[in-house]
Image (cartoon, rainbow, N blue to C red):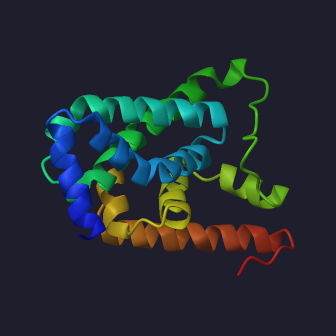
Amino acid sequence: MNASADMSRDAELARNGDTEAFARLYALVYEDMYHIALYSLKNSHDACDAVSEAVLDAFRQIATLRDGKAFRGWIMKILSAKIKRAQKEYFTTLDSIEEQDQAEDFSFENTELRDALSRLEPVSRLILSMTILGGYTSEEVSQVCGLKASAVRSRLTRIKKQLRTELSERGKNYE
């Protein structure tokens, strides 16, 4: 049986209340979820919170999932909403926060790259993290972000170009 069939079978079982089936589904996506949340939020505590909240919501709403093969995109869409909410909170509490902790178990190799990435708008960071870190297709990202797949591809090209330009101006070559 292939992975897609297993996912569909587990989704059907989870819809009928099988918590072990839901756990198997979660095991397929938890690393991607954490990396995407961490990359988007830049704080391990907030990333863990976003993932936990998304998984809880997904568990509560699993009965609404119509196509088991769509589980990955469905749970990422829930995670995306949690990330966006957390990013909104950043902007409302930015003045009261002196300095946010950097993630302990995820490090950027140089400060210039980290700074360039932090200047990206939240949706651009999400698109970049889902495609580069998560390996999601533009179609999958488009479902999560509410954009057309072609818009995701165009935006990703612009994001990469922007990063290359900014980093080359600083004397770093990231081709």
Q: Pick the residue in front: 120 or 12.
A: 12
Q: Residue 86: x, y in percent?
A: 51, 31
Residue 13 image-quadrant placement? top left
- Vertically, is 57 above or below 14? above
Q: Residue at x 34, y 52 (%)?
A: 144
Residue 5 image-quadrant placement? bottom left
The reply, left or right, for residue 8 in relation to residue 157 is left
Q: Residue 127: x, y in percent?
A: 47, 58
Residue 146 visible in the picture:
no
Q: Residue 116: x, y in percent?
A: 72, 57
Residue 25 visible in the picture:
yes
Q: Residue 64: x, y in percent?
A: 15, 38
Q: Residue at x 23, y 69 (%)?
A: 1
The reply, left or right, for residue 37 in relation to residue 93 is left
Q: Residue at x 33, y 62 (%)?
A: 140
Q: Pick the residue in front: 16 or 85.
A: 16
In this view, the residue farthest toward the top is 96
- Vertically, is 77 above or below 47? below
